[in-house]
Image (tube, rainbow, N blue to C red):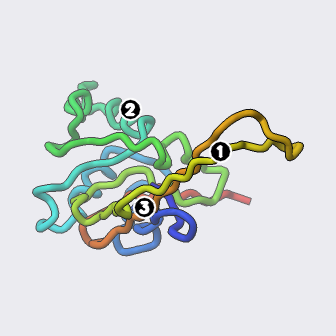
């Protein structure tokens, strides 16, 4: 989700931050129902048919609580895992509405919408494992245990940035 790409895979939030795919909140430093519509409307039509939502649970819960002027739920379909007729997925590693703090200067990328076929996760074929016949402790003496050392390589990348839109509820600290 947020990997920097140097010693870890590049996350989609990291890849989309600061690009044309980043959409600012409609009401400054606050998240509102208008942002959900604006984000969906900003995605080009060619990516709409397979688009899905992604957000952290606190953001999803806030969306579920938006109400109409009459007090009815604005997005009742959130309870069934959808938002505006598209699947809604939880991603706990994303920033959430809980992270939006007007006392800090920060970018808060809290809601993503897009065609996820434009994001690739690649694992190198094969995992390597070595058996360690004798494990040594911090005192450089055998512990009487055996061990295994395993590694594999994985990577990820947004290959079609135009296929995504991510909402930034940016905040600016007042000094």
Q: Quadrant of the C terminus?
A: bottom right
Question: Horizontally, is 103 left or right of 91 in the view?
Answer: right
Q: Disc 1 marks which residue?
A: 133
How far apart, in angstroms, are the residues tagged by discs 3 and 2? 32 Å
Lower sequence index among marks 3 and 1: 1
Dot 1 falls on a residue whose secondary structure is loop
Tags 3 and 2 touching, CB below 8 Å: no
Residue 24, image quadrant: bottom left
How far apart, in angstroms, are the residues tagged by discs 1 and 2? 50 Å
Visible residue check, residue 28: no
Residue 75, image quadrant: top left
Lower sequence index among marks 1 and 2: 2
Q: Residue at x 65, y 38 (%)?
A: 146
Camera-side mark, 1 or 2: 1
Dot 2 falls on a residue whose secondary structure is helix
Visible residue check, residue 109: yes
- Crowding around mark 2 (Cα neighbors within 10 Å: few <14, some 14 to 19, many 20+) is some
Camera-side mark, 3 or 2: 3
Lower sequence index among marks 3 and 2: 2
Residue 23, image quadrant: bottom left
Q: Looking at the image, which is closer to me, 165 or 89? A: 89
Q: Residue at x 74, y 33 (%)?
A: 144
Q: Disc 3 marks which residue?
A: 154
Q: Which mark is residue 169?
A: none
- Percent position (x, y) of residue 122? 34, 63
- Crowding around mark 1 (Cα neighbors within 10 Å: few <14, some 14 to 19, many 20+) is few
Tags 3 and 1 touching, CB below 8 Å: no
Q: Which mark is residue 61?
A: 2
- Percent position (x, y) of residue 16? 40, 67
């Amino acid at each position: 989700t947020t990997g920097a790409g140097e010693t870890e895979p590049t996350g989609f939030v990291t890849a989309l931050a600061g690009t044309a795919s980043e959409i600012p909140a409609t009401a400054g430093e606050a998240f509102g129902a208008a942002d959900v519509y604006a984000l969906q409307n900003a995605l080009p039509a060619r990516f709409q048919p397979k688009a899905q939502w992604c957000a952290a649970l606190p953001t999803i819960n806030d969306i579920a609580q938006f109400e109409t002027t009459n007090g009815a739920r604005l997005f009742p379909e959130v309870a069934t895992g959808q938002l505006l007729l598209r699947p809604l997925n939880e991603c706990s590693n994303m920033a959430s509405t809980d992270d939006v703090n007007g006392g800090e200067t920060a970018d808060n990328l809290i809601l993503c919408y897009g065609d996820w076929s434009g994001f690739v996760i690649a694992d190198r074929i094969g995992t390597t494992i070595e058996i360690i016949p004798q494990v040594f402790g911090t005192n450089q003496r055998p512990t009487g245990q055996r061990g295994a050392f395993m590694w594999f390589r994985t990577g990820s990348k947004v290959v079609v940035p135009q296929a995504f839109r991510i909402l930034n509820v940016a905040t600016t600290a007042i000094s």
